[in-house]
Image (tube, helix red, strand yellow):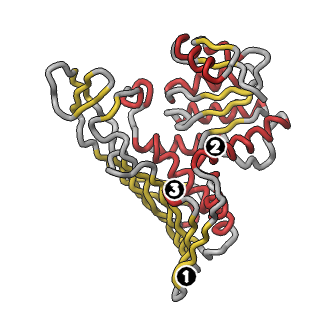
């Protein structure tokens, strides 16, 4: 397969990207992505645009890979699930963290009964990228990014990986949110916490931090700490699963190690020095997606996250 068209927010940016990667067509008109010679559309826009773009691609007969969060409104995401099912087109959402080899192994162990009955799941997703001063971008525009930030940006990933690990779905949530600098000032493309002479004041209502309590089906309980303002945390996603026969834990900054503890037996750490790194999770995810695209339709049990996963994630974030 080859990339034949890139559509950007403006023609100049699209053409520069196309030149860099040797893509023959570029522009700012989304209809370019629906041309007859295109089989699959990758939608990497701000989430406010996902619903219309996904619907248009499906109606044009294109397979679709959409970034997360899938949509803001569960009614919209449900409609896209139904449309995708009616067309029998491949549909996927970009929850790539599942594709760390340690995460794949964790799911096999947990769903295979290695931990016995699962009782709880807890963890965190911590980053530093929104500490002030930081760049201003579309994530701070609620018309493009929606009313939330930490929950939809990184919390959506954590919820997906927790469900993936234990093979069970979230059925209830409660959360506490923290926004520590609702008044900010923008100079050029940079936001700061204190006013300066040339700065323009901004009101930011989305959360920097969220602490979530979660109830899964089958009586499993959980919680997660989500933060985009944790100093020194580049991309730290951690998950710990406790069962009556063992406890398993993993984190994305030590992604080659999978730890399992047993009562009275200490901890067994499995290390896979040949495991793929973060960027390779995307390659593994797309390999699974494109296997179905080559077949022309979704497999009976897709190995990648589908619109159904995206829709459930939207409902959780909305709740």
> 284 or 80, which lies in front?
284
Q: Quadrant of the N terminus?
A: top right
Spatial CA distance of label 2 from label 3 is 14 Å
Label 2 sits on residue: 282
Q: Nearer the viewer, mark 1 or mark 2?
A: 2
Q: Nearer the viewer, mark 3 or mark 1?
A: 3
Q: Position of residue 122 (x, y in %)?
A: 46, 63
Taking the spot 76% from the left edge, 32% from the top edge, the residue there is 89
Task: Give the mark nearer the N terminus: 3 vs 1.
Answer: 3
Label 3 sits on residue: 252
Q: Position of residue 224 (x, y in %)?
A: 42, 57
Q: Position of residue 253 (x, y in %)?
A: 49, 56
| Whether residue 242 is situated above or below residue 316 in the rendered picture | below
- Contact check, label 3 and label 1, Cβ < 8 Å: no
Q: Is residue 4 left or right of residue 78?
A: right
Label 1 sits on residue: 262
Taking the spot 39% from the left edge, 27% from the top edge, the residue there is 137
């Amino acid at each position: 397969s080859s990339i034949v068209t890139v559509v950007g927010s403006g023609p100049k940016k699209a053409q520069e990207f196309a030149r860099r990667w040797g893509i023959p067509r570029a522009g700012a008109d989304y209809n370019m992505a629906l041309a007859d010679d295109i089989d699959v559309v990758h939608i990497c826009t701000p989430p406010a645009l996902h619903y219309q773009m996904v619907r248009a691609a499906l109606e044009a007969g294109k397979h679709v890979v959409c970034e997360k969060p899938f949509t803001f409104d569960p009614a919209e995401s449900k409609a896209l699930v139904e449309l995708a099912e009616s067309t029998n087109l491949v549909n996927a959402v970009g929850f790539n963290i599942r594709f760390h080899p340690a995460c794949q192994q964790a799911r096999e162990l947990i769903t295979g009964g290695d931990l016995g009955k699962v009782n709880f799941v807890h963890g965190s997703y911590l980053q530093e990228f929104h500490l002030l001063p930081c760049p201003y971008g579309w994530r701070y525009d609620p018309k493009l990014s929606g009313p939330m930030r930490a929950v939809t940006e990184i919390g959506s990933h954590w919820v997906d990986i927790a469900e993936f690990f234990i093979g069970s779905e979230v059925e209830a949530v409660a959360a506490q949110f923290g926004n520590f600098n609702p008044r900010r000032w923008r100079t050029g493309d940079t936001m700061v916490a204190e006013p300066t002479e040339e700065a323009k004041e901004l009101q930011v209502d989305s959360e920097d931090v969220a602490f979530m309590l979660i109830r899964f089906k089958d009586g499993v309980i959980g919680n997660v700490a989500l933060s985009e303002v944790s100093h020194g945390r580049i991309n730290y996603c951690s998950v710990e699963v406790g069962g009556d026969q063992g406890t398993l834990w993993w984190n994305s900054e030590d992604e080659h190690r999978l730890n399992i503890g047993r009562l009275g037996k200490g901890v067994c750490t499995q290390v896979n020095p040949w495991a793929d790194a973060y960027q390779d999770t995307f390659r593994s995810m797309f390999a699974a997606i494109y296997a179905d695209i080559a077949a022309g339709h979704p497999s009976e049990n897709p190995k990648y996250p589908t619109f159904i996963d995206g829709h459930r994630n939207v409902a959780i974030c909305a709740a």
